[in-house]
Every structure is written in structure tokens, then in C-alpha cells.
Image (cartoon, rainbow, N blue to C red):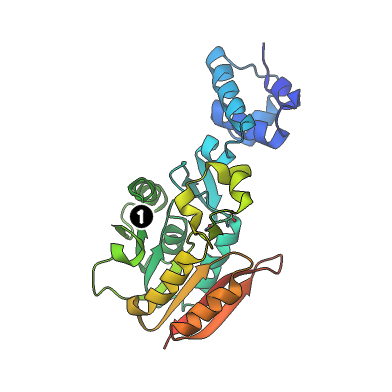
Amino acid sequence: MVSVASLLLEGSLPRLEVRLLLQAVLQCSLTTLISAPERCLGEEEIAHFQALQARRQRGEPMAYLLGEREFYGLSFLTTPAVLIPRPETEELVDWALETSAPLASLHCLDLGTGSGALALSLQYHRPHWQVSATDHSAAALALAKENAARLLPSSGPVLNWYLGNWFEALPKGETFDLILSNPPYIAAADPHLDRGDLRFEPRQALTAGPSGTEDLAHIIAQAPLWLKPGGKLRVEHGFDQGEFCRSCFLRAGFTQVTTRTDLAGLERLTGGQRS
Ligand code: GLN
């Protein structure tokens, strides 16, 4: 007999992870789980739990095992086709929402949307905005659309989804008030790629080339062609890429070039305005 309590005490994984895996296997809330620790698992439930436990022990990210991850208060389906949404990227949503008049009707773009985290958080909080999103991966775009169907009311706003590489995905002549992107920015030889969750995430969502800044440079240089006058671009980047990004923004003719730091005081977001 294998009870919830015995698994929680077993110690092969951190208890929080065991609890989350058990919630997934038993399809129950935390309250239900911990209010009946004597509950015994059936044979199939044990097999399911052990399979998830073994995958976790091999290092697979919790977000892929559970199939979802919370971002900006919304639960996003998350598969190995997409980068796992990260808390630091929530700052990009904050910045976008706080620097735009709530009633303004903006045309926004999320470049390289992955699970749809940025595009759908914006659309959820600003249903009157017209939001477009691109991705190079058809599997990612399919998942983002699935997330849209889950998170937005069926009678609500409809996003434009475009498959393709950065701006090449867009119809010619399209212009935006606001462009956001969390592109890949890790250097191809960065040893972090061989550690933790990153080992399991799509490489094309993490690295852009030898220096890691290749896609940032491309996006910043091209963005003025896709922004309305006065339109804004805001990107996420590595903690040591702030100066590089500011110089790209200035070279591309942006004004009001600003970098924002995260809670740890590291430079993680840079933005500018098309004059
Ligand atoms: N911030 C992520 C990390 O360092 C990388 C995400 C990205 O490349 N856009 O794990």
C-alpha cells in the first residue's frame, strides 16, 4: 500500500515537487491532497507517479512534467516545443501595461511568442488592443493558439498569429504601436545550457549564435520599419547585454532609450521609442 504520506516523506525529490506531481497524478487540489494523507494510490496512479518521478530525477523540468506554468497570473500549457515562461519576463508585461494609457487602442506585436505568454498576458489585460504574435516554430504557434483558446473568452478578442522568422513572418506594410520580444540571447557555448531546465528547452529559443546577441541586434535594427512614429520597442536580454542593446537602439535611431533592472538590480530589459 502506497499512501500520499509515505510518498511525501520518502525524500527522493524535494517535497514540494512530490506534492505537485501527486496533485497532477490524482488530479486534486493541494487542500484535498494534504487533508487526506492516508489516501492510498491505485496501481495505475502509482505507475504514473513513478514515471513522473523518474523523469524528474533525470532532470526534466517540472513545467514539462506538469504540462503547465503560471505566468502573470495565468496558467499556460507548456511543452518541450517552447521555452518555459519565466518570472523575469513578467516585468516586460508590467512595463508594456504601465507605459500605455489604459484606454488607448494599441496595435501590439510579440515577436517569438513561444507559449504565447507575452501576447496573451497583454491581450488578457487589454482586450481592446489588437495583438499579433509570431513564432518560427509551427509547434510553438499551435501551442500558443491552444493557450489563447483556454485563456481568452470565446467571444473575446482574436489575435493574429504569424509563422516565420522575426519580422519576415509579418504581412508587408503592417505597423505597430508597441513591439515586445523575449528573443534567444544566450551565447551558443554558454555552459549554463548544459545545466538544469535549460538542457530540455528548445535550443532555438535560447541561443541565437556565438555571442548570443545576434537576434537582439537583428530585431532592434529592423524594428523601426515596423513601428508607427512614436511606437515603442521593448526587449528582454541577458544581465550583461544592456550596454550592447542600448547601443543598438541608438544606432537604429531610437529615442528615450532606457534600461530596466530586475529585483536583483541586473539590467534585463531595454526599450526605446521610434521618433
Ligand atoms: N532568461 C532565460 C535564461 O537565462 C533565457 C531566455 C531567453 O534566452 N530568452 O534561462
Amino acid type, label 1 = His
Mark 1, residue position: 136
59 to 275, vertically: above or below: above
For the question of whether residue 252 can be seen, the reply is yes
Front residue of 229/128: it is 229
Q: Residue at x 38, y 52 (%)?
A: 148
Left or right: where 137 falls relative to 61:
left
**Quadrant of res 174:** bottom left
Query: What secondary structure is marked by label 1?
Result: loop
Residue 124, image x, y percentages: 43, 60
246 to 20, vertically: above or below: below
Image quarter hosting the C terminus = bottom left
For the question of whether residue 158 can be seen, the reply is no
Front residue of 229/29: it is 229
Left or right: where 186 falls relative to 253:
right
Residue 273, image x, y percentages: 46, 83
Q: Residue at x 40, y 63 (%)?
A: 111
